[in-house]
Amino acid sequence: MTDQTYQPVSAPADFLDGFRRVPRAPQGRMSEAQAARVAAREARVAAAAEFIADLISGRARAYYLREVLAPSSPEMIRVIESNYPGVIAPRVIQESARGIDLDEAMSISDFPLLTGDVLERTMLARFAEVPQVWRQYIDVGAPLRDFRDIKMLETTGGNEEYEEISDLEGLTYTSIAESSQTMSPALYGKAMRLSWRLMMNDDLDAFSVIPRALAQGGRRTINKFATDLLFDSTGPDATIFTTGRGNRLTGNPALSVTSLAAAITALMSFTDSTGEPINVDGVRLVYGPGLHTTVQNILNTLSFDATTDAGAASNRTIRVNNWMTSGITPVMDPYIPVVVTGGNAATSWMVTAAPNASRPLARIRFLQGFEQPALYQKAPNTQRVGGGLDPEIGDFQSMASEFKGLVAFAGLAGIEYKSGVASNGSGS
């Protein structure tokens, strides 16, 4: 075998003719374009962090966050961008400058998914300070799309018992009747103005109280409206609950084990238009603060004396376990004495079927997006000479900051009078 040794081959001198050297970035370093993008991102993150810190400490207005997440005002975009550069997406700023509608523009900042629901949780926590107990006995329908009247149609008949068909006889025909009821939505609101001097002297945190106060006002508006659907100045609404209909107990007895049993019996004894029984799923005992002790005594009694075969010769008294503890849901509505002003506020009560029944006693429907009071603040229109808008000054003329709360809904009572039985407790 011949011993062959590797011999390097020398490239000719013109081997790289026609080629040029490509500049390369040093190992581990970014190009200028990459560095610029990273720097821009870091600046936006820093601005976002500063914005969140100012928002938490109160140095930035709460409504700034709403504008960052869903920009709607070109003026506010300029204010926020001047104080926190990069928080709002450049595309949104460009579209605002060109006059493009901002309602469809969405921010693509780095933190909406992380913090977008923080403000909402805070607002709901404040708003929930007043409980909506009426939701336990009044139905809440689907959201409304606009302010046009809502017509609810209902049909009766057609579900009668079948008849036997004899030989050579034909079928008998039935029919369906229709009727309707109308709900009319309405808008409710309240505004508040805070002077610039008060803001400057705000050592009692009065500014932060305004949104909470407006939210409470909206909640109280809904609560009182709901209670007023089924109560009037004398007790349970006299146009809905009557002895002729059988949904007002004769003699308006005071609340007791006996009268409560009579009301439940009456509620479960109602029949539909064809004389068939109505299924009652769940019973609510609705009462005001004046009957709270009475209700607790009734529902927490271990046993009580009852009579059998009332009115019969064999009628006798027996002791039974308190079956009402598992069959009744108590609902103490504190707005009953606010609505009932004629002397029966402390004694009025009623039993109702569960609010999610197909034919409820009453129903409320909110305008879509206004299921809870919506809070707003007027955008500032005062600009420093040579600078941007100054949110601290507010209105140019009055130097005041303005706030408002809005809520929109419709309500209707007496949708089905057979879904409740009431008494004003007066004994007469």
Image (cartoon, grey):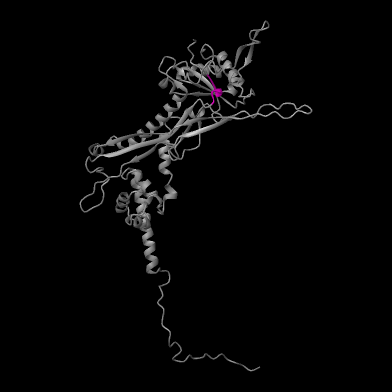
Question: In the image shown, does 197 or 223 lie closer to the viewer?
Answer: 223
The residue stretch that appears in magenta? 416-421
What residue is at 51 percent from the left and 91 percent from the top?
Answer: 9
- Relative vertical location of residue 165 with respect to residue 386 in this rendering, above or below: above
Single out the residue that lies furthest toward the left: 385
**Residue 173's spot in the image, x, y percent?**
67, 29
- Relative vertical location of residue 329 with respect to residue 73 in this rendering, above or below: above
**Residue 240's spot in the image, x, y percent?**
50, 21
* Residue 159 is inside the magenta segment: no
- Relative vertical location of residue 297 with respect to residue 127 in this rendering, above or below: above
What residue is at 46 percent from the left and 18 percent from the top?
Answer: 235
State the quadrant of the N terminus: bottom right
Q: Is residue 248 left or right of residue 344?
A: right
Question: In the image shown, does 82 or 72 lie closer to the viewer?
Answer: 72
What residue is at 67 percent from the left and 5 percent from the top?
Answer: 313
Single out the residue that lies furthest toward the top: 313
**Residue 416's spot in the image, x, y percent?**
54, 26
* Residue 419 is inside the magenta segment: yes
Question: In the image shown, does 16 or 317 lie closer to the viewer?
Answer: 317
